[in-house]
Image (spheres, rainbow, N blue to C red):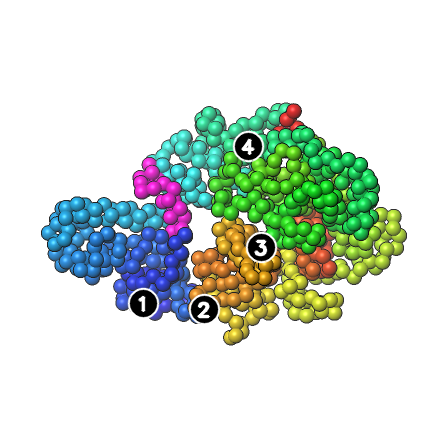
Amino acid sequence: MKYKKEQILEIEGQLTNIIYKNDTNSYTVAEFLTNENEEITVVGYLPFINVGDSLKLIGNLIKHPDYGEQLKIMTFEKIMPTTPEALEKYLANGNFKGIGPATAKKIVETFGNDTINVIKLEPQKLTKIKGITKEKAFDIAAEFLKNWELWQIVGFLDKFGIGPQGAETVYKKLGEDALEQIEANPYVLIDVANKVNFEKVDKIALELGYEHDNYKRVRSGIKYGLEKVALNGHSAVIYNHLIEYVKSLLNVSENVVEEAIINMKAKEEVIIEDRDDGTEWIYSKSFYDTELNIAEKLISLNNCDNVKYIKKISKELEDIQKQIGMTLSKKQKEAIESINDNNVCVITGGPGTGKTTIIKAIIELYKKHGMKPVLCAPTGRAAKRMTETTGEEAKTLHRLLELAGMVSDESDNFNVDLLVTPIDGDIIIVDETSMVDMFLMNYLLKAIYKGTKLVLVGDIDQLPSVGPGCVLKDIIASNRITTIVLNQIFRQAAKSKIIVNAHRVNEGMNFIEDKKADIDGNEDIELLDDFFFINENRPERIVDTIISLCSGRLKKYGDFDFLNNIQIITPTKKGMVGTKELNKILQEKLNGYDEEKNEKSFGEVTFRENDRVMQIKNNYNMIWEKDSDNKFGKDLGNGVFNGELGIIERINPVEKNVRVKFDDGKTAVYENADLDQLEHAYAITVHKAQGSEFDVVILPICQLAPMLQTRNLIYTAITRAKKMLIVIGNKGTVDYMIANNNTKNRNTGLKYKMEKIL
């Protein structure tokens, strides 16, 4: 059989050797012998598979640069071995306790092609074989039937759009009678499997004879509707809107949906909140409980006795100013005094308004009085920046709370009642709080002792968190927590066109490119050449300009190196100036094929040494090491999180792994099965760039979907640049984005709950 590259193949044969298998997710590299007696390497998720198994595989033939032709498995099906040789290998492959090669050979010689039926239906006949007792014969039969169930479940779930990896998850959650449970109620998959295609499950259930108004069906439709709401960042939906959606989705009456909701409410699967304005909102219980916990914890924490109060704060601040070598403005002093007067306080403002100076002053003030400050941020880069600007160690919230191994990235695994590690500190300062979603905020508040001060710092005009909720904005809007709004640009910051233009954009004004400007009454401030706008309509010209800038054109402005200083940030994944195409082009131009650099292919992606990459999902258990302050060892830890950036240091062709050094200094090793957690990061989206700063940011804007043409998106992108910002794109589109402040509001209830608590 001759194969064509990129050909979709369907082959049958036998697994002859397992080269590699990840015990966690069953990602497998194996040798496969086809029925045409041709050998081929196969890669993909193969749960419940052993050497000797007969399989039907469907996949894409790819050309690996090191290992040659491989079949990348899309789906597979176990089939019963049909030849005596195949039967013998199957029985001898370790699936059956007590059957080795010799016994397997005797069984097949005795029963021939009838071997399978004997084991399944008449196991007592196996006692004809010397060494097989009646008890052992029935053990063999039981083990066979168990394996047979595992065989069936993968093929069965494939028609639901659930691949082999998902099938293993389903099996682990439902147990050995998984098939029976699914056949009895296909909608159980909505509860146990992440991101199941509801339409496919529903179609099959209807084919099995489910009535349109069956309660199990309607309940799953409601859950599916609430999940879609959450994926768009909302925590709740208006009751009538959900009913209308489910009616349309399932083609059932309003009464049927309402009856199901009443039943789910009685079982506390959903919560209905009647608000003072007459609206009814429906929540999944975990989302409602999370909001309620946040509201109660914040109010309770704020109402505690202020045991960390410092007397004569005004005099103290005079000394602190000398210590940090900076003069505090009236607004900054007000912020620090508010923190002193309250257990919980919010500091919000754009770039250059003095948030960092406030944090530094607070740290020194409380350290002076023998109190312990704790600094944290939602991302690794934000924590690293906080450490650099304050001189104090800052941790990610995940690391601070020791969430590794306790929560997962699966949307159905949020545990509202999760017990987290209490935080040992007197004052906790959280930076980039606008990025903190409702679940992470809940975990944080659960870890704070009463009497501890909490300072939430952030910019509410940036994009909201990737996860559901709009926590910082809701806290401020509730008027229950003292909030200091910083809106004055300090003279030093006002010299930067980046900062000036960020504030202009936030106020709906177009870019300024003049060399001088009047900033907050400071006339004719000489501006830095740190901002450039290149008006270009054609995507191909935008790409050419990006390549030129990254290839050395920026050297005349400073010692800017692409891997270390320059980051492309784009609003979109699609199109010529989207991340997908830009990453391909920039890898080729900036880190092209070199015989001295090792490579590793994973699906359609080729990773290469010196590639810039990003972690794209939370992996709480990934082991990392980092150079220690102690000369004689390394710091070890676990947890690599969504959005962390790094460089591929080494691809080991012998051990077949990839070593990545992240920007915060930690190093992690990725096996084959882990590579789906990485993607190229020559260009990243604005959403992924949140919480990070880069020396040089290049922002291409061209051919954007309407939902991306918003002020808060371009504002967030601009505020990622520290030393230079280059915007390349269509002026009309840029001006429209600046003018468009009609951002899509998130439906949440945290503000309402905080307002109602006495």
Residue assigned mark 3: 644
Q: Secondary structure at mark 4?
A: helix
Residue type beneath disc 1: Glu
In this view, 604 is above or below 169:
below
Residue assigned mark 4: 288
Occupied quadrant, residue 310: top right
Q: Name the mark on residue 39.
A: 1
As for residue 689 lying within the magenta part, the answer is: no
Q: Earlier along the polypeptide chain: callout 1 or callout 4?
A: 1
Q: Nearer the viewer, residue 649 or 326?
A: 326
Residue assigned mark 2: 653
Q: Residues within 10 Å of mark 1 (few under 14, many from 20)?
A: some
Principal secondary structure, stretch drawn in magenta: helix
Circle 1/circle 4 CB separation < 8 Å: no
Which segment is the magenta one? Answer: 159-184
Q: Nearer the viewer, residue 269 or 281?
A: 269
Q: Position of residue 192 (x, y in %)?
A: 42, 41
The residue at 65%/46% (across/down) is: 375
